[in-house]
């Protein structure tokens, strides 16, 4: 059975993404405290696969993971999109009126901003993980604290749900990537992710995007990130419809290679299913 690394404790949303994506396979899970540890586990062979979040429909991109994609030689081989529903939970018997702190991952706190702003006296306390927050409250037996996490986390750590569905918008989805050392380009139509940089010359970025427009290739997402070690220079992450197995996409990549100062194909994979 393959080992699959994810960031967080048992009950984390990333663990659910693992179970949903690999539901027809047998596997072991490897919980990691940080995103960096999950990437490193797949890179070094401690795990064969890592599953990491890359963007949320409310809070935006997980910028750290874009940087880690560039750092590690891993290929994107799949994706899955989960509907995220956040719940407030505490020890059995604890009343909401007694809660003074709410712990969760910063992304989850941001996704629940509207709910938290209704209770200005309650401190929103950042933690390393949603499920880890639930675990912390259970282990410390705090009577004045709650966690924002999944229903699975409440069940995992014996907590009671005080408020359900506290995300600011019900259209709350997180996109997760599946990462492996070996690339797996799908035989049929899919999507591709690349990262590239361009020179500081007028029209350079326009020319790079034109290689896709000229071939009627649909761009799905573009994200810029600072180029570490080079102040005020940037690299661009881009997702587009199609894979290098399709000649027009391969030609676009070859054309871009002539223009860009740096180019790397991060992966080609099937479009992910949306799980509600």
Image (cartoon, rainbow, N blue to C red):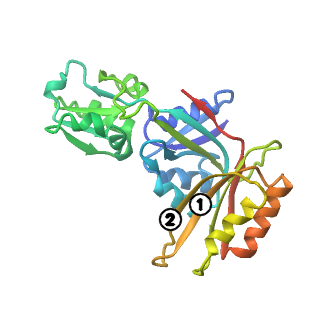
Identify the image quadrant of residue 108.
top left
Residue 46, given in percent of the width and then of the height, sits at 59, 50
* Residue in the picture at 16% in, 39% down: 120
* Residue in the picture at 33% in, 29% down: 166
- Circle 2 — which element? strand
Q: Which residue is denoted by mark 1 in the rendering?
A: 237
Do the numbered discs 2 and 1 sit on residues whose CB atoms are within 8 Å? yes
Q: Is residue 176 left or right of residue 217?
A: left
- Circle 1 — which element? strand
* Residue in the picture at 37% in, 40% down: 111
Residue 266, given in percent of the width and then of the height, sits at 67, 57
User: Up-down: is 159 above or below 100?
Assistant: above
Identify the image quadrant of residue 257.
bottom right
Q: Which residue is denoted by mark 2 in the rendering?
A: 225
User: Up-down: is 249 above or below 150?
Assistant: below
* Residue in the picture at 37% in, 26% down: 165
């Amino acid at each position: 059975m393959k080992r699959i690394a994810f960031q967080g404790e048992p009950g984390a949303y990333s663990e659910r993404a693992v179970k949903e994506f690999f539901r027809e396979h047998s596997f072991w899970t490897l919980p990691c405290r940080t995103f960096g540890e999950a990437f490193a586990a797949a890179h070094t062979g401690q795990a064969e696969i890592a599953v990491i979040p890359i963007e949320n429909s409310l809070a935006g991109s997980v910028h750290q993971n874009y940087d880690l994609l560039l750092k590690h030689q891993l290929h994107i081989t799949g994706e899955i999109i989960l509907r995220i529903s956040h719940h407030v939970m505490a020890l059995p018997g604890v009343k909401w009126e007694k809660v003074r702190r709410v712990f969760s991952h910063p992304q989850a706190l941001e996704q629940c901003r509207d709910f938290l702003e209704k209770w200005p006296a309650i401190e929103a306390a950042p933690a390393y993980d949603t499920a880890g927050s639930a675990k912390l409250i259970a282990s410390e037996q705090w009577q004045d604290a709650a966690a924002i996490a999944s229903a699975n986390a409440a069940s995992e750590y014996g907590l009671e749900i005080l408020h359900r569905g506290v995300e600011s918008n019900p259209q709350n989805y997180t996109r997760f990537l599946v990462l492996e050392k070996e690339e797996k380009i799908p035989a049929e139509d899919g999507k591709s992710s690349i990262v590239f940089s361009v020179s500081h010359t007028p029209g350079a970025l326009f020319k790079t995007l034109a290689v896709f427009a000229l071939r009627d290739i649909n761009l799905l997402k573009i994200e810029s990130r600072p180029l570490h070690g080079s102040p005020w220079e940037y690299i661009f992450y881009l997702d587009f419809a199609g894979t290098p197995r399709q000649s027009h996409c391969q030609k676009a990549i070859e054309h871009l290679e002539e223009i860009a100062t740096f180019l790397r194909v991060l992966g080609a994979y099937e479009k992910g299913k949306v799980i509600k």
